[in-house]
């Protein structure tokens, strides 16, 4: 089965990893200049560098259908710049997954594939897409929703070791970002992480720099540009897919299997539908 994943950030990469390991043919679509933060575990980095390896999976930038097929034959995940998803009509995937995490629908529709799935806020299951997956940390993380919506995004980052909002680094101005620290570096509270133009960007807590936006990226004021993990002993986590991303990948796999099961039961004259699984 062919699966198109819209978005190549860290959560989308977790989804791609689970589906790839489960035997699906994956194609990732992203914008021309992705703004991923956890870049060491984002397939979107291949848009800039041409190729990236996340854990034991290689992702390569492609330009056309022939390149896509070549990657699939070589057991490589292809990624291409296609913000509107125009390639979807050409390759006719079995599944489309919206993993953009934009808190709103940027154009994904049920008509794109026999099975359509979206992650998080901004979609209504049964209307915009077939299934929505809950992305909010907590008891319902990864819940498969077949009718209705995911929880409203709060804008408050998940808590790690008692720290929530202060672990996220935001831009203080508009301008080009230049980095002083790199992913995996240990940083101290109020230490300079980088600059936006001439404006100093400092961390509010001590820890490990888990993610930082790409050098030279044009950022806007209040834009998220970095992430500090207060668990200094967890440095290796900077370079592996997160628990949340893997959980969402498992939920997407479950959603696909649920839809296939539902279709089989309909053909057999049975019905089985729940609001969430």
Image (cartoon, rainbow, N blue to C red):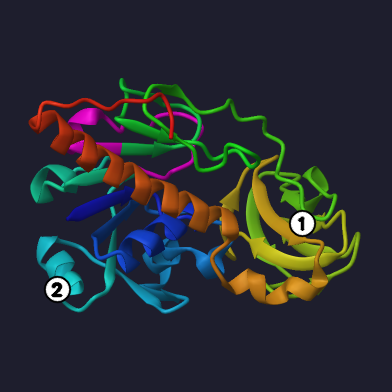
Q: Is 266 located above or below residue 248 in the figure?
A: above
Magenta-colored span: 98-116
Q: Tell me if 33 is positioned left or right of 174 in this view.
A: left
- For residue 37, say whether it is visible: no
* Residue appearing at x 38%, y 37% in the figure: 118
Find residue 25 and report its image quarter: bottom left
Q: Residue at x 82, y 48 (%)?
A: 166
- Residue 134: image x %, image y %? 51, 36
| Secondary structure under the numbered disc 2 in the rendered image | helix
Q: Nearer the viewer, residue 160 or 265?
A: 265
Residue 264 in view: yes
Task: Check disc 1 and report its element: helix, strand or loop.
Answer: loop
Nearest to the eye among marks 2 and 1: give it: 2
Q: For the C terminus, which image quadrant?
A: top left
Question: What residue is disc 2 on?
Answer: 70
Residue 62 vs residue 16: left or right? left
Q: Which residue is mark 1?
A: 198
């Amino acid at each position: 089965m062919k699966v198109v994943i819209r978005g190549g950030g860290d959560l989308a990469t977790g989804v791609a990893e689970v589906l790839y390991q489960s035997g699906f043919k994956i194609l990732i679509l992203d914008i021309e200049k992705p703004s991923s933060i956890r870049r060491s575990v984002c397939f979107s980095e291949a848009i800039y560098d041409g190729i990236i390896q996340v854990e034991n999976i290689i992702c390569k930038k492609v330009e056309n259908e022939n390149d896509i097929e070549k990657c699939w034959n070589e057991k490589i995940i292809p990624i291409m710049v296609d913000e509107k998803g125009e390639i979807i009509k050409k390759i006719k995937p079995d599944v489309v997954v919206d993993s953009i995490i934009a808190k709103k629908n940027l154009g994904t529709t049920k008509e794109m594939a026999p099975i359509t799935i979206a992650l998080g806020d901004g979609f209504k299951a049964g209307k915009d897409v077939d299934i929505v997956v809950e992305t909010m940390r907590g008891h319902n993380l990864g819940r498969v929703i077949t009718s209705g919506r995911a929880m409203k995004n709060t804008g408050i980052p998940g808590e790690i070791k008692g720290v929530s909002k202060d672990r996220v680094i935001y831009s203080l101005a508009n301008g080009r970002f230049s980095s002083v620290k790199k992913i995996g570096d240990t940083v101290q509270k109020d230490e300079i992480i980088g600059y936006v133009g001439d404006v100093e960007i400092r961390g509010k807590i001590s820890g490990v720099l888990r993610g930082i936006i790409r050098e030279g990226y044009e950022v806007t004021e209040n834009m998220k540009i970095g992430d500090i993990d207060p668990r200094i002993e967890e440095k290796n986590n900077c370079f592996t897919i997160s628990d949340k991303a893997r959980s969402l990948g498992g939920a997407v796999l479950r959603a696909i299997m649920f839809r296939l099961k539902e279709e089989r039961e309909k053909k057999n004259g049975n019905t089985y539908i729940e609001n969430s699984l």
